[in-house]
Image (cartoon, helix red, strand yellow):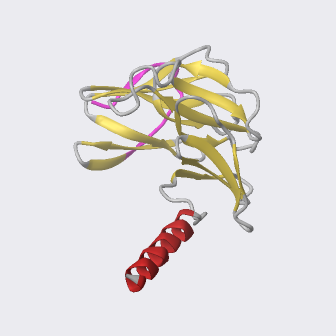
Amino acid sequence: MKPILLTLQFLLLCILLSAQDNEPYFLSNPCLAPDGQTVVFSFEGDLWKANVNTGDASRLTAMEGYETSPRVSPDGKWIVFRKEGGSNTMGSGYTSKPGIYTMAADGSNENFVTDRGDMPRFNNSSDRIFYQVGGGMNTNYASNKPDGRDERIHLKSMYGGQFTVSPDEKWIAFQDLYQVYIASFPKTGRTIDLG
């Protein structure tokens, strides 16, 4: 009886010690800040930032919903991200207002930009936010001002997606039917049809 009791006590101690493990798991969507000293990422449905040298992390968001896809502005002052809507797991009312948001790099001044779009990122001058809209046989690459005004549809594609603008904003890479393409990204003021 005594060996069984000791074994049970040992197992309980192991469970308690493993529960105190502070190592985070399931981190996703990392984005390195322009200064290279900070990484912003998603963890447990919220956005966090961490110092790359010390590993010290702090939570940026703690609101209802699941925040993902953070990108830091080129000047390092702002973060754009997507707040996901409900799902079968979380329920339809989990996020009261899904969409694309911005906030200051310290987590303050959250601002709603648009209720549609995915994969947001700032342009070079941080005065517009690019994002992908739609999917399937109708995908657009659009942008708005950070206050949500002045939406522009830059590109449309029947099967394209995963749009990525080059740092100098002269080129666009995208996926189309399991192939990757690179095309010029001229600023014509009109929507360009990629086919």
Q: Position of residue 183 (x, y in %)?
A: 40, 42
Left or right: 149, with 152 as reference point: right
Q: Tell me if residue 32 is in the magenta stretch.
A: no
Q: Is residue 192 magenta?
A: yes
* Quadrant assignment for the C terminus: top left
Q: Residue at x 35, y 37 (%)?
A: 161
Task: Judge left or right: residue 134 versus residue 29.
Answer: left
- Image quadrant where one finds the N terminus: bottom left
Which residue in the rendered view is the most extreme toward the top? 149
Q: Is residue 169 visible?
A: no
Residue lying at 74% horizontally and 56% vertically, measured from the top left: 35
Give x and y (percent) for residue 94. Answer: 47, 25
User: What is the x, y in percent for residue 131?
Assistant: 49, 31
Q: Return the residue found at the far front.
A: 1
Residue at image x 60%, y 45%?
Answer: 168
Q: Is residue 148 left or right of residue 65?
A: right
- In this rendered view, identify the residue nearer to me: 160 or 71: 71
Kindly indicate the quadrant of the structure image that contains residue 75.
top right
Q: Is residue 193 above or below residue 75?
A: above
Residue at 53% in and 45% down: 44
In terms of depth relative to the viewer, which is nearer, 28 or 127? Answer: 28
Residue 62 coordinates in the image, percent (x, y): 64, 36
Q: How many marks?
A: 0
The answer to whether residue 95 is visible is yes
| Magenta highlight range | 182-195
Viewer-nearest residue: 24 or 194: 24
Name the chief secondary structure element in magenta: loop
Q: Is residue 135 above or below residue 28?
A: above
